[in-house]
Amino acid sequence: MADAPGTNGYTRASILIHWLAAALIVILFLTHEGDRGGIANVIHVSGGAVAGVFLLWRVWYRVTCGLPEKSDQAPIFNLASGIVIWGFLVSIVVVIATGYLLPWSRGLPLEIFSIISIPSPMAFNHEFHEIIEEIHEISGQVFVPLLALHILGALKHAFIDRDGITKRMFDPVDSGR
């Protein structure tokens, strides 16, 4: 299926935002097991607090601007694609929200690079903290299978379908999304 120019692609800004968000998520995922106070932990917690604002904006932008039209493929593949994209967006929101809540549920401030300290709006609550910690961990781990499916889908479009869908993430259009 040939795409009409500008109706089913992404602008240079959207492509840059996509790859920046992807890089931030990978960095945050790779640093999530850092020792408390260590550089990986500081990158994960402080970097996550800062990146979280950008990533939440990214989710809002993607939801409000919409997604390109579905490609001409079997409905099951379009369903899988939708589940993966919406899975990413929901996981991003849940990981960020629970990430902000983790120190606060311990009654501690959210420390950002030892420069900014956002006080906790709540008192320590062990049970709530444990629940939030589990949700944060699970929603972060959800990225692994979603990313695998996302990459497999891109490879399918690039090498099996050869339909130009994958090219959208590397070749901007002026009037894209």
Image (cartoon, rainbow, N blue to C red):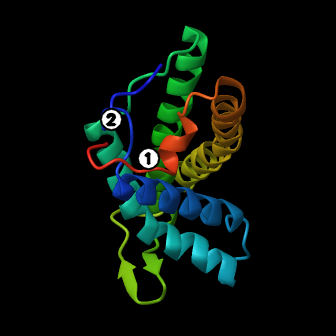
The reply to whether residue 125 is visible in this rendering is no
| 100 lies above or below 131 | below
Residue 44, position as x, y percentages in the image: 59, 70
The residue that appears at 34% across and 51% down in the rendered structure is 11
Q: State the residue position of label 2.
A: 5
Between disc 1 and disc 2, the foreground one is 2
Counting labels gives: 2
SS at badge 1: helix
The residue that appears at 47% across and 32% down in the rendered structure is 86
How far apart, in angstroms, are the residues tagged by discs 1 and 2? 32 Å
Residue 6, position as x, y percentages in the image: 31, 38
Residue 62, position as x, y percentages in the image: 35, 42
Mark linked to residue 93: 1
* Mark 1 or mark 2, earlier in chain: 2
> Is residue 50 or residue 77 the one in the foreground?
77
The reply to whether residue 84 is visible in this rendering is yes
Q: Are the residues tagged 1 and 2 within 8 Å (C-beta)?
A: no
